[in-house]
Amino acid sequence: MSHIRGRLGKAADKLVAEYTASISFDWRLYCHDIIGSIAHARMLAKQGIISEEEAEIIIRGLESIGEEIEQGKFKFKPELEDIHMSIEARLIEKVGEVGGKLHTARSRNDQVALDLRLFAKEAISKTLTKLREFQQALVSLAEANKDVVMPGYTHLQPAQPVLLAHHLLAYFEMLQRDIDRFTDCLKRTDVMPLGSGALAGVTYNIDREFLARELGFSQISQNSMDAVSDRDFVVEYEAAASLCMMHLSRLAEEIILWSSAEFDFIELDEAYATGSSIMPQKKNPDVAELVRGKTGRVYGKLMALLVTMKGLPLAYNRDMQEDKEGFFNTVDTLLSTLEVFIDMVNTLRVRAENTGQAANRGYILATDLSDYLVKKGEAFRTAHDIVGRLVSYAMEKGKSFSRLSLDEYKKFSPRFEDDVYLVTVESSIAARDIVGGTAPRQVERALATAKKIVGDSIAEK
Ligand code: ARG
């Protein structure tokens, strides 16, 4: 049995040991655990709490354990409960009793908080990189299809024509907010908890600032009880991930619609679609469907952690061990989703003819005809009614607006003149020349800004 039995004489029941163990998943923290322990050993030596020689032995031992794990040579034993105990036990096995000095002025409670924060900081940085790559993919697709028009929808009914680039840049904005959220979450993750001990602080003269510098943290925690029981940063990551997945899921849904035979706006690269086992004509957008599908689990993990945390008294409680699987799964799901989605966007082809035709179908210029009448002096509400009746009439006759004669137009309002035929999809788009609008001039500007944002962030690295 492991050496943490303390006052407990009896060995833990096998089932209990299995039930309480976290090693099957927290082994993933081994790197962070070792890095944290090395910094801790250095600090203990610097403060004269252990000798330099002892620190050297401990550090070399930890490094070789890292290699053992990396090379798959390390034997994880369930009875050693978690990654912290596993590494410490192996250290003592390798270097002898001096290994037992590593845990001076530390508890697994501040140790696990540290490991998880190191892991989270890494996850945030990987997430931010992928989000920038996604923005880059959107910008490239928008740029390559700068003149492509399509119907804009409300209620999934054709509403007003827009540029495809404008539509795509809407997602750029969503991802920008995601980037802001993860960047903000990093501020509160970037806090070094060692020195909190089990809950009340430690009795040794340790140097917490030194630990923070060694481990790349910009701040140290200010309350030991909060520091060992705070998992806000995990909740925040999962909340930001949920919002981000919501955005990705919405784009996935559009990709699914657009690649259907009914829309036929885009063609997915074959690598991102699958065939059916019985229907040879099918090309299913499985990747996009799974982006949409996996969004559910990310929300689920967020809910699970919020519920786990809500009833916990200060300070550490074992319930908190439940934070990890959901967090790891969220990080893995978000990163792999971003990765595969970026490639899918980079390889899809736009069928500009079809989006253009769709934009010309129906009575999508009805708003523009109302605006036309308003500019000729009609009150907007009246203009709206007139065009409403005009649409009913045209539908009855089975005619598009452009095929109505001027006489027919004039039956609805004397304000209609020859120039009504100048109201086209192109003029409709060009007329929305306002910041945030779909006019080519505005979209060009938005694209330039987007390129600068993406370019600057790549230059920063
Ligand atoms: N495996 C534990 C966790 O993930 C580590 C901390 C254990 N601390 C304790 N007092 N049992 O939360």
Image (cartoon, rainbow, N blue to C red):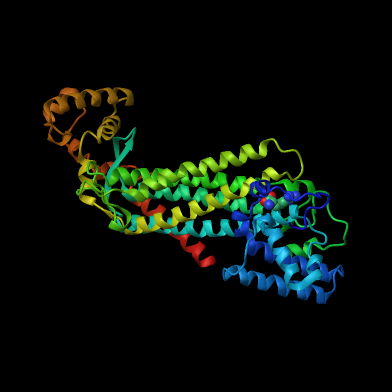
Does the image show residue 191? no
Q: At 71% across and 38% down in the image, what residue appears?
A: 312
Compared to 362, does 26 lie above or below? below
Compared to 260, does 86 lie above or below? below
Compared to 321, does 40 lie above or below? below
Residue 298 x, y percent position in the rendering: 51, 44
Residue 121 x, y percent position in the rendering: 61, 57
Q: At 47% across and 50% down in the image, what residue appears?
A: 175
Q: Nearer the viewer, residue 164 or 27?
A: 27
| 70 lies left or right of 311 | left
How many numbered markers are drawn?
Answer: 0
* Residue 92: quarter of image: bottom right
Q: Nearer the viewer, residue 370 or 360?
A: 360
Residue 23 x, y percent position in the rendering: 63, 55
Q: At 27% across and 22% down in the image, what residue appears?
A: 385
* Residue 308: quarter of image: top right
Q: Nearer the viewer, residue 20 or 292?
A: 20
| 41 lies left or right of 414 | right
In the picture, the quarter occupied by the N terminus is bottom right
In the picture, the quarter occupied by the C terminus is bottom right
